[in-house]
Image (cartoon, rainbow, N blue to C red):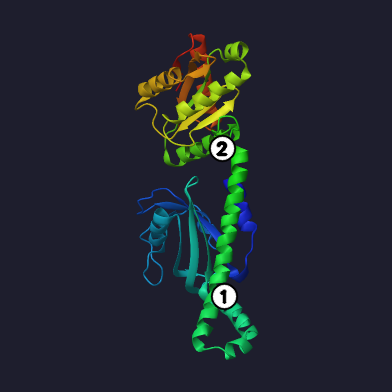
């Protein structure tokens, strides 16, 4: 999805030499290497560069610091700073709108150099000459200001509209309709992204695969609607105790995936105990009968020798199979 968005941005053109750029936040506290430049049509050769909130423009201001503090406090902001123009070494003041997309840790921004707006302003002024001559000078400034605000507001509203459309499409593409957690497609994307981060920054991720023990018997005994209710209850219970939001995914049927950005060796026994006890405490009532169930799980993590994310999934799946062979209602680890 990130690659697709990057291609769309690089292939798009806008009036007044405007363009969209994206920085990914690595540390919301700021400082050196707080973010990485992901997409920048005007500085393509610097994509991948680490950024610092201590960087200044030609006037000595700190635009990255202003941007980070603004999106942290309000989620979005307008601000100005000095930057070179598209395809030129000319530096001039730029008015920018930036918004934080927290799910991706992306700050998406778009701006326009103030001197590039002169042509637009001159055109509208010429068309309004007769009207302007009949009104007081104070209203001249008001009209020009309204034109500027109108153009910026159109950009803002278009971004909001696109965001709503993207959110609906994202839910359809990446959310399991039964349980409300991420689906297999989303899980694969997250695992791939975590593997890239692991190779780049050695950030560990605990990967667990688990499924419901004797789930077919639940369906056969109580019906598939009760089986579905068990999966929904299990998803809610596990989501409340695992590491972060968007870390649980329905892998298929009664099988689920967990991807936690943490070192699994630090509190491995606690993780195993939490998974098993949380599942056993999940209850579905049917005709006065309390239906309980257990799970079997396999846990692994990325290894320096891994060449793809598929290897950690295979290890977790192998550990899950071993847990079933050893009697179910247990968690096995394979590293």
Is 47 above or below relative to 283?
A: below
Q: What residue is at 57 percent from the left and 52 percent from the top?
A: 163
Residue 276 place in picture, x, y as percent: 43, 18
Closer to the camera, 302 or 144?
A: 144
Q: Nearer the viewer, mark 1 or mark 2?
A: 1
Residue 143 place in picture, x, y as percent: 55, 79
Would you call the spot at circle 2 few (<14 residues within 10 Å), some (14-19), or many (20 or more)? Answer: some
Q: What residue is at 49 percent from the left and 12 percent from the top?
A: 328
Question: Secondary structure under badge 2?
Answer: helix
Q: What residue is at 58 percent from the left and 50 percent from the top?
A: 164
- Tell me the residue that label 2 is attached to: 189
Would you call the spot at circle 1 few (<14 residues within 10 Å), some (14-19), or many (20 or more)? Answer: some
Residue 198 place in picture, x, y as percent: 46, 37
Is 239 above or below relative to 43?
A: above
- Tell me the residue that label 1 is attached to: 147
Residue 298 place in picture, x, y as percent: 48, 20
Closer to the camera, 209 or 123?
A: 123
The quadrant in which residue 16 appears is bottom right
Question: Secondary structure under badge 1?
Answer: helix
The quadrant in which residue 189 appears is top right
**Which of the image's four quarters has the N terminus?**
top right
């Amino acid at each position: 999805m990130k690659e697709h968005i990057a291609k769309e941005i690089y292939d798009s053109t806008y009036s007044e030499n405007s363009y969209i750029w994206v920085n990914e936040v690595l540390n919301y506290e700021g400082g050196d290497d707080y973010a990485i430049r992901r997409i920048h049509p005007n500085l393509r050769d610097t994509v991948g560069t680490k950024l610092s909130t201590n960087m200044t423009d030609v006037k000595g201001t700190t635009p990255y610091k202003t941007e980070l503090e603004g999106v942290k406090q309000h989620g979005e902001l307008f601000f100005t700073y000095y930057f070179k123009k598209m395809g030129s070494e000319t530096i001039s003041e730029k008015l920018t709108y930036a918004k934080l997309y927290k799910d991706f840790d992306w700050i998406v921004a778009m701006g326009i150099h103030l001197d590039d707006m002169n042509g637009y302003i001159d055109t509208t002024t010429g068309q309004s000459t007769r009207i302007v001559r009949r009104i007081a000078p104070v209203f001249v400034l008001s009209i020009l200001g309204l034109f500027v605000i109108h153009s910026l507001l159109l950009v803002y509203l278009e971004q909001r509209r696109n965001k709503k459309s993207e959110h609906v499409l994202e839910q359809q593409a990446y959310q399991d309709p039964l349980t409300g957690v991420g689906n297999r497609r989303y899980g694969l994307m997250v695992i791939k992204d975590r593997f890239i981060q692991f190779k780049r920054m050695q950030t560990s991720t605990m990967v667990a695969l688990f499924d419901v023990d004797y789930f077919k018997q639940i369906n056969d005994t109580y019906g598939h609607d009760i089986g579905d209710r068990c999966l929904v209850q299990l998803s809610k219970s596990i989501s409340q105790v695992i590491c972060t939001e968007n870390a649980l995914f329905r892998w298929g049927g009664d099988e689920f995936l967990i991807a936690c950005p943490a070192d699994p060796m630090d509190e491995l026994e606690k993780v195993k105990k939490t998974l098993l006890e949380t599942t056993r405490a999940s209850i579905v009532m049917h005709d006065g009968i309390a239906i309980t169930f257990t799970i079997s799980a396999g846990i692994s993590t990325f290894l320096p020798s891994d060449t793809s994310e598929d290897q950690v999934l295979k290890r977790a799946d192998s550990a899950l199979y071993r847990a079933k062979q050893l009697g179910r209602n247990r968690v096995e680890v394979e590293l």
